[in-house]
Image: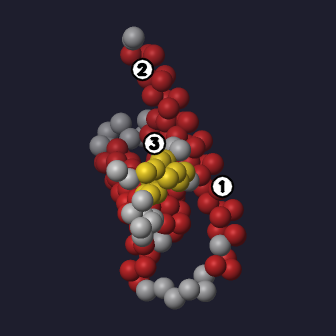
Amino acid sequence: MDATMVTLLDSVSIHLYLLSAIFALCGRTQRLHQQENDDHRTKTPLSFLEDVEALEDLGDVFFGVASIVDVVLCDFTFDDNTPWWPVVSAVFWIIDALLYLRVDFIVLYRDKKLDGTTVTTAASASMGTDFVSMEQDVI
């Protein structure tokens, strides 16, 4: 495989991530409208770290911003002499991944049934989009 083909595949994957981010952010706005009447419960400042939907929505925002940065870096050459733009992109992707990992841990460990016979696991459909729950027997 030559360098041109690798560059083309890299460009396609970057643009597909942006498309995925657009879909994730559009789904996020629909969920916000559905949850407006659900905010009657008492919240503490640390309750945000336990709120799966809020963490996932924030992860979607970081996913979108990181995707935009990557597309700009791919399509334009203004960053050729400034090495900090890829660092900015990497920071956004790391924060995005940490938010999604937090959601995974909450879903995996909080949603255990009390009797210990089943456990709920989460699998991402793609980077940071909605989670699919499935029950598995615990041995």
For image coordinates 42% across by 70% down, the residue present is: 114
Please identify, in this view, whether the residue under mark 1 or under mark 3 is nearer the observer: 1
Residue 70's label in the rendered image is 3
Q: Which of marks 1 and 3 is nearer the N terminus?
A: 1
Tell me the tag on residue 6.
2
Q: How far apart are marks 1 and 2 (CA)?
A: 30 Å
Asked if residue 32 is positioned above or below residue 101 in the image, the reply reads: below
The amino acid at mark 3 is Asp
Measured Cα–Cα span from mark 1 to mark 3: 19 Å
**In this rendering, which labeled residue sits more in front, label 1 or label 2?**
1
Give the residue displayed 53% in from the left and 62% down from the top: 57
Mark linked to residue 75: none
Q: Can residue 72 be seen in this view?
A: no
Nearer to us in this view, 36 or 104: 104
Above or below, comparing residue 77 to residue 64 in the picture: above
The amino acid on which the numbered mark 2 sits, given as a three-letter code, is: Val
Check disc 3 and report its element: helix, strand or loop. Answer: helix
Q: Which of marks 2 and 3 is nearer the N terminus?
A: 2
Tag 1 residue: 26
Label 2: few (<14), some or many (≥20) within 10 Å?
A: few
Quadrant of image for the N terminus? top left
**Relative to residue 83, is residue 60 drawn left or right?**
right
Query: Outermost residue, top direction?
Result: 1
Q: Disc 2 on helix, strand or loop?
A: helix
Element at label 1: helix
The mark nearer the N terminus, 1 or 2, is 2
Which amino acid type corresponds to the residue marked 1 in the rendered image? Cys
Label 1: how many residues lie within 10 Å, few (<14), some (14-19) or many (20+)?
few
Label 2, label 3: how far apart the Cα atoms are? 16 Å
Counting from the top left corner in percent of width and height, residue 102 is at 38, 61
Label 3, residues with CA under 10 Å away: few <14, some 14-19, many ≥20: many
